Image (cartoon, helix red, strand yellow):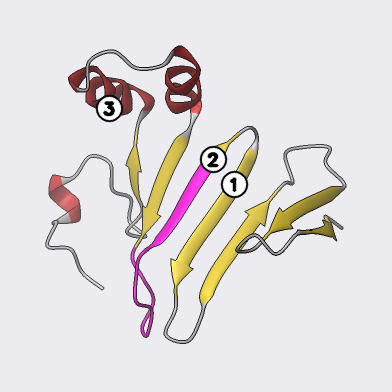
Amino acid sequence: MTNGIDPSENTGCTGDGQRTVSTEQLAEALALLGSIDPVCADVLTRLNLRVYPGEPGDRTAYVVLDVHGVSIGVKRRAADLYLHADTTETDDRLIAFEVNGGGEIDHPTS
């Protein structure tokens, strides 16, 4: 999957194709919106957003959002939706998640 951006021209791009949005860039973008709820502003200025090119057969890029010490990754593959949760930097021992309002399911982190 390509997006027409030459990595040599994009300071937010690494050799593996990863693209990032820095806290400063996000704050500048938020400023364009005008006033924003303080709770939302606090969360948005603390998150990290990374985007990796999709692999062959993927329908989208792989997007990773780091927030509250957890990394959540998502991409649409050819036949499914892939979700990844990385809690290695937390002391969480259980992840409770829900899909389409079907009720919470607990998943151990180890």
- For badge 2, the amino acid type reads Asp
Q: Which residue is denoted by mark 2 in the rendering?
A: 66
Q: Say which mark, if any, is on residue 95.
A: none
Residue 3 percent across, percent down from the top left: 18, 63
- For badge 3, the amino acid type reads Gln
Task: Relative to 48, say whether 19 is above or below.
Answer: below
| Residue occupying the point 65% across, 55% down | 85
Q: Nearer the viewer, residue 24 or 38?
A: 38
Label 2 SS? strand
Q: For the stretch drawn in magenta, what is the main secondary structure?
A: loop
Q: Which residue is denoted by mark 1 in the rendering?
A: 71
Using the numbered discs, state the Cα–Cα distance from disc 3 to disc 1 in whole angstroms. 20 Å
| Residue occupying the point 83% across, 41% down | 92
Task: Relative to 14, say whether 53 is above or below.
Answer: below
Which region is colored magenta?
A: 53-65
Does label 3 or label 2 sit earlier along the sequence?
A: 3
State left or right for residue 69 relative to residue 95.
left
Label 3 SS? helix
Question: Which quadrant holds residue 75?
Answer: bottom left
Residue 6 percent across, percent down from the top left: 13, 56
Question: Which quadrant holds residue 66?
Answer: top right
Q: Nearer the viewer, residue 9 or 31?
A: 31
Q: Which residue is denoted by mark 3 in the rendering?
A: 25
Does label 2 or label 1 sit earlier along the sequence?
A: 2
Q: Count residues near mark 3 (Cα–Cα under 10 Å), then give few for <14, some for 14-19, many for 20+.
A: few
Label 1 SS? strand
